[in-house]
Image (cartoon, rainbow, N blue to C red):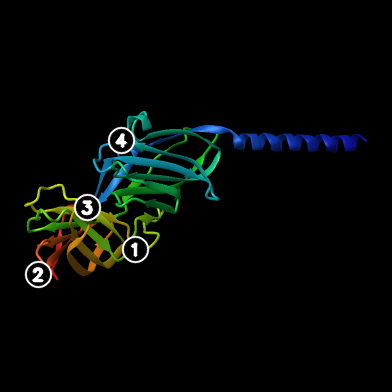
């Protein structure tokens, strides 16, 4: 009888310990992420690395932070807009409470304008669902939240988009109200973990030049590539105010690379002209390719 009672007591003790363990695992603990301490890396042509604080880089207008469990469940997500002080106390600083355990942390810094729609649904799926892609930096890493310690995390965000710049060497006539650039490949959606496009079917964006008629135009846009380097056909159309096509320029096998600028320069508004192609191997240095 005493032996049975002793075993029963041991069983109750084990159950009690198990419940206490579960309670500890479910306890919420404070977590802090300081995006002000994140560095945005910009690879220079000389292979040196320059970094800037997220809050100081003018290309970053929005930051999104999210945590996901191992099965992909989103347990926290918040977005701060630099121009909307109601979305943060200090831009780039996040505080939340998470259960003890392991998570995938996703941080995305990007450009933003009114009307933009950006979605982050998992560590592998994010997208711009509006007309334009913005300059985008991302970092994804595994973190462990513990019962003790500061639970403060940091990472390095890398630019993951390619950029196209269309520069006219002639002047825009008054009838030309917009410029539409169409990519045969690339995407507006991407995998935050790899930085690569999640589809490769291409898309188009339309830009209304801010310069007055009678002046050259400089149209810029971004895209996500399906690989680090990718070549594709690019179509540039000049539109009137009613979106009627006035002129079309077709350029084949245009090379793009992540974190680089491909510049198309030429007489955009002259029907018989051709465009020269420049590939910039960083945001600063230029390699020129003529075709």
Quick one: label 3 or label 4, which is nearer the N terminus?
Answer: 4
Whether residue 259 is visible, yes or no, is: no
Quick one: label 4 or label 2, which is nearer the N terminus?
Answer: 4
Q: Residue at x 18, y 65 (%)?
A: 248
Position of 50 relative to 149 (above/below): below
Front-lying residue, 157 or 176? 176
How far apart marks 3 and 4 lie (CA) works out to 24 Å
How far apart marks 2 and 1 lie (CA) works out to 34 Å
Viewer-side label of 3, 4 = 3
Residue 169, numbered circle: none
Question: Element type at marker 1?
Answer: loop
Q: Give residue 192's position: percent from left, percent from top.
A: 40, 52
Position of 266 relative to 78 (above/below): below
Relative placement, left or right, of 71 versus 18 is: left
How far apart marks 4 and 2 lie (CA) works out to 45 Å
Q: Give residue 83's position: percent from left, percent from top.
A: 29, 34
Relative placement, left or right, of 63 versus 181 is: right
Q: Are marks 3 and 4 in contact (CB under 8 Å)?
A: no
The residue at which mark 3 appears reads as: 207
The residue at which mark 1 appears reads as: 227
The residue at which mark 2 appears reads as: 272
Whether residue 10 is visible, yes or no, is: yes
Residue 82, numbered circle: 4
Viewer-side label of 4, 2 = 2
Relative placement, left or right, of 125 versus 101 is: left
Query: Residue 21 appears in which quarter of the rendering?
Result: top right
How far apart marks 3 and 1 lie (CA) works out to 26 Å
Dot 3: within a 10 Å radius of its alpha carbon, few (fewer than 14), some, or many (20 or more) residues? some
Question: Element type at marker 2?
Answer: loop
Question: Element type at marker 3?
Answer: strand
């Amino acid at each position: 009888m005493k032996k049975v009672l002793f075993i029963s007591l041991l069983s109750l003790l084990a159950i009690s310990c198990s419940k206490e363990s579960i309670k500890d695992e479910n306890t919420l603990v404070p977590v802090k992420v300081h995006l002000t301490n994140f560095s945005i890396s910009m690879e220079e042509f000389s292979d040196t690395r320059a970094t800037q604080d997220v809050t100081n880089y003018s290309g970053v207008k929005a930051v999104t932070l999210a945590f996901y469990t191992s099965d992909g469940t989103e347990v926290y997500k918040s977005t701060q807009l630099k121009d909307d002080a109601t979305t943060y106390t200090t831009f780039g600083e996040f505080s939340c409470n998470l259960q003890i355990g392991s998570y995938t942390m996703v941080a995305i810094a990007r450009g933003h304008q009114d009307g933009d729609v950006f979605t982050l649904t998992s560590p592998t799926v994010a997208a711009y669902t509006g007309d334009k892609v913005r300059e985008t930096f991302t970092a994804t890493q595994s973190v462990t939240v513990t019962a003790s310690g500061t639970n403060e995390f940091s990472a390095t965000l890398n630019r993951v988009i390619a950029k196209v710049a269309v520069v006219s060497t002639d002047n825009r006539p008054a009838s030309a109200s917009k410029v539409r650039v169409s990519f045969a490949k690339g995407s507006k959606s991407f995998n935050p973990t790899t930085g690569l496009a999640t589809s490769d079917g291409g898309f188009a964006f339309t830009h209304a030049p801010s310069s007055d008629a009678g002046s050259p135009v400089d149209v810029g846009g971004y895209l996500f590539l399906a690989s680090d380097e990718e070549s594709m056909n690019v179509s540039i159309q000049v539109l009137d105010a009613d979106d009627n096509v006035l002129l079309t320029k077709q350029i084949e096998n245009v090379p793009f690379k992540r974190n680089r600028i491909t510049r198309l320069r030429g007489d955009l508004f002259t029907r018989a002209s051709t465009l020269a192609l420049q590939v910039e191997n960083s945001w600063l240095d230029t390699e020129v390719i003529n075709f």
